[in-house]
Image: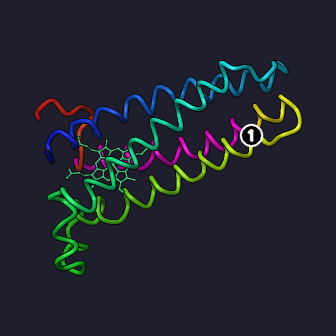
Amino acid sequence: MYTYILFAHSWLRWAVFIIGVVAIVKAYMGWKNNEPFTADHKRTNAFLIASIHTQLLLGFILYFGLSSKVQPAFQNFGLAMKDPISRYFAVEHITGMIIAAAIIQIGSIKSKKQASDTQKHRTAFMYFTIGYVIILLTILSAIMTDKMSWFRFEI
Ligand code: HEM
């Protein structure tokens, strides 16, 4: 079970990255070109939120139930903080991702409430970009320090 959920969580990052770029580009174009906020924009933003919610769900299952990199921290938090991999997954990863997810979620809600379509695009663009950069930096910091790989091939 652990390996399947980890595999899904690992590959779903690419869905988040790709849908995130599409949503940010569409919001930017919509904002700068004064485009109407269409059903297509709504759908793209809904896909972004759905992909992030799925990552949160899988992440919480790994974090509180399955992950061999996090469970030792529940036994001895102080000791786990001395190990960079445990510290990353027990503290840094979850913190970065929850902050990013909250910013993107708030952006999506605020965007819908704006009076004009240009403001809807602008709000989505601002919040999505900030959340996306946090996700990117959190993941890249782990890849660059060998705490995770670009692609997981083994289950
Ligand atoms: C947009 C949100 C998220 C993205 C893009 C993301 C991405 C990733 C990636 C790429 C990995 C490495 C997988 C591998 O080793 O191949 C990972 C591992 C992990 N993530 Fe996330 N994550 C997200 C949210 C979360 C959240 C909110 C939590 C906790 C509640 C979480 C908990 C974990 C844990 C515990 C691992 C390590 C599992 C293990 O190797 O034992 N993730 N995540």
Q: Residue at x 75, y 31 (%)?
A: 121
Magenta stretch, residue numbers: 123-146
Residue 128 covered by magenta stretch: yes
Residue at the spot of label 1: 111
From what the image shows, is residue 11 above or below residue 93? above
Q: Main secondary structure of the magenta part?
A: helix
Q: Position of residue 73 (x, y in %)?
A: 21, 72
Of 122 and 109, the residue lying toward us:
109
**Crowd class of label 1 (few under 14; some 14 to 19; many from 20; radius 10 Å):** many
Q: Residue at x 24, y 78 (%)?
A: 77
Q: Residue at x 28, y 54 (%)?
A: 61
Residue at the left extreme of this rendering: 154
Say left or right for 139 vs 104. left
Q: Give the quadrant of the N terminus.
A: top left
Of 136 and 20, the residue lying toward us:
20
Q: Residue at x 20, y 68 (%)?
A: 83
Q: Position of residue 136 (x, y in %)?
A: 45, 42
**Rendered image coloring scheme:** rainbow
Say left or right for 155 vs 103. left
Q: Position of residue 114 (x, y in %)?
A: 83, 40
